[in-house]
Amino acid sequence: MKIVLVSIDSKYIHTNMALRYLKANLDMESDLMEFTIKDSDDFIYDQIVQASPDLMAFSIYIWNVEKAIRIIKQIKSTLPSLIVIGGPEISFEPLHFMNHYPIDYIICGEGEVAFNDLINALDQNKPISSISGLVYHKDDLIIQNKMTIIQDLNSLKNPYLDPLDIPNLPSRIQYIETSRGCPFHCSYCLASLENRVRFFDIERVKSDLLYLMNHGAKTFKFLDRTFNLKVDYALELFKFIIEHHREGTVFQFEITGDLLPKALIEFLNQNAPKWLFRFEIGIQSTNEATNLSVDRKQNNAVLFDNIRLIQSAKIIDLHLDLIAGLPEENLERFAKTFDDVFSLYPKELQLGFLKMLRGTKIRREANQYGYLYDENPPYEIISNQVLSPKDIEEIHLTEEVLETFWNKGFMNQTFETIIRQVPSAFGFMNAFGHYLLDSKFDFHRFQLSDLFNVLSEYIQKTEPLKHPIVFDSLKYEYLVRSQIKPKIWWDNALDKTDKNPILKDFHKSHKTYNPNDLYKYAIVTPYKGKHLIVLYYPDKLEVIEYQKKR
C-alpha cells in the first residue's frame, strides 16, 4: 500500500508535527508531501496525482480546510485512492464532513495509534470497529467509534528523527510538546475539550531539544496550552535551556500569567540570556463578568503584577493577547480592557477577534448571546447582543492602528509619550484611525517615512501645543532606527536647519572627527533645544546630542 501524508501549512517555516507523528508511528513506509496555502490547488493536485497513492491522509486546520476539501474533491474524481482526514477542524463535527464530502475515513482526536491501527486493518482486511475515534461509512450509515486518549505519551515514537528533515531545521519553527491537554475550560477554545493533562518524560524532551539544536534548529515553539502548569517541570526545562542553548536560539511558551510564581520570574530575570525566552500571555479580557461567561478564571491584580515584574528586567520577550467579541463586553467595556492592558506598554499586543470554532461551547451557546458569525472558516463573529457590526468595525480600525504604529516597533517611544497624555489608548488609536481613513492612508502599502509623517501631521492638527515634543521624538526614532541615511520626511525649511555651521562649530571642540566625514555622513536637526547629529558611517551609526556654543 502506497501511503502519502499531505500537509498544507500556512507558511513554509511552519512544521506539521501531526503528520510527522503519524509517519513515525506507522508500521509501514509512508511519504510526507508538504505544501503551503500559497501553492495553487492545481499544483498540489498534480503533485499528489503523480505520486499515485493508494491512501492519502490530510491534516486539516482552520486555515487550510477549504483548500484541502477542494483538492480532495478533485482527487476523488480522478484517483481511486482512499482519503483519510483528521485534525482539530475535523475532530469535533466529523459527521458534517462525512455527509458533505467524498471522504472515506475520519480520525477524531489523537491519531498516532488510531491511524496505524487503520492502516494495518485495511492491509490485513481486519475489522475497524474498535479503532479509537474512527468515523466511517457502513452500508448506508455513518459509524463513529468511541474516542480514547493516549494514556502514555512516552509510548509514541519520536517524530523529530527523520533524516529528511535535517536540512530544513535551521529555517523552520520546531514545535515541541511537553504535555497534551488543558485543565481549564475556556468556552471559546478547543483545548478545553481535552481536560486530562498528560506529560512527556522530561528527559525525552531534553533529548529532543539537544538533537534539534545540534542539527541547527533556531526557533522553538512549545505547544503546551499552559507551559507553567507544573512549576517544577517548567523550571527544570528553563534551567536546561539556559545551560544548553546555542547562540541565536529562541524559545516561545504559552504562559498563564497569574499562575507564575514570582520566584520563577525572578530566577529567569537573573539567569536567562536576554530574549532567549518569549512568553505569550493571553489576557483576553479584564472584565470579570466576561471571563465568568466563558468559564475563565483570572486574577487580574496578580497577572498585572507578574507582567510588570517580567518587564522590569527586559530579559523576556513578552507578547500579550486580547479577544474582542467575548460575551458581556460591549464597545465601551472592551475599550476599558484595551486601555487596562495597553497601560503595560507591551512590546507586542495582539488584538484578535472571537472565532466560533467547531466543537466549542461558545459556538453551541451562540443563540444565548445573540451571536452572528461567518459560517465559513475562520468563523469570525459579525455581531452579538452587545456589539453591533459597526462596533466590530471600530475595533478592527483600532487594531489596524495598533498593528501598524505599535506592534511593528517603529516608533514606540513616541507612541507611549502620546498615550500617557490622553484619557484612552483605545480612543486615541480609534480617532487616529478615522483620520487615516479620511486621509486615504493605505494600511498595507506605505513607506516607513509615511508613518512618521502622518502621525506628526495628526498631532499638529489635533494637539498643536504637544506637537514640538512629539516631533522631536518622531525625528529621533526615525533617524536612529536606520543604518543608512534615510529619506527625510519633514520640511527642512520649517526645521530651519543649515547643518554646515552646526558641524563646523561641532568640529572645533571635537577634533577627532574627520570634517569630510561629518559633511558626508551627517544628518543634523533641532532636538530638545539642542541639535541631533546622526552619522551614518558605512560600518556603524553614531548619535550625538550637541549644544552649539554661543
Image: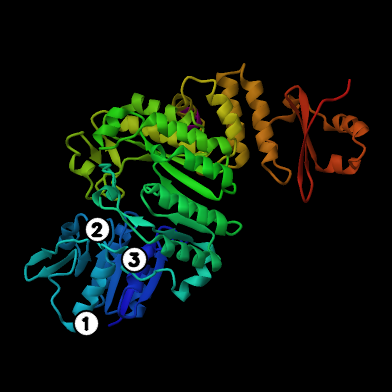
Image coordinates of residue 536 in percent, x first then y, are 77, 44
Decide if residue 202 is in sight here.
Answer: yes
Image coordinates of residue 138 in percent, x first then y, are 9, 70
Left or right position of 385 against 11: left
Q: Which dot, 1 or 2, sits closer to the camera? A: 1
Image point 39% across, 25% down: which residue? Answer: 336
Q: CA distance from mark 2 to mark 3?
A: 25 Å
Left or right position of 44 against 100: right
SS assignment at label 1:
helix
Q: Earlier in the sequence, mark 1 or mark 2?
A: 2
Judging by the rendered image, the residue that carries numbered circle 3 is 154
SS assignment at label 2:
loop
Q: Which residues are magenta?
A: 434-438
Amino acid type, residue under disc 3 in the picture:
Asn
What's the mark number on residue 90?
2
Q: CA distance from mark 1 to mark 3?
A: 26 Å
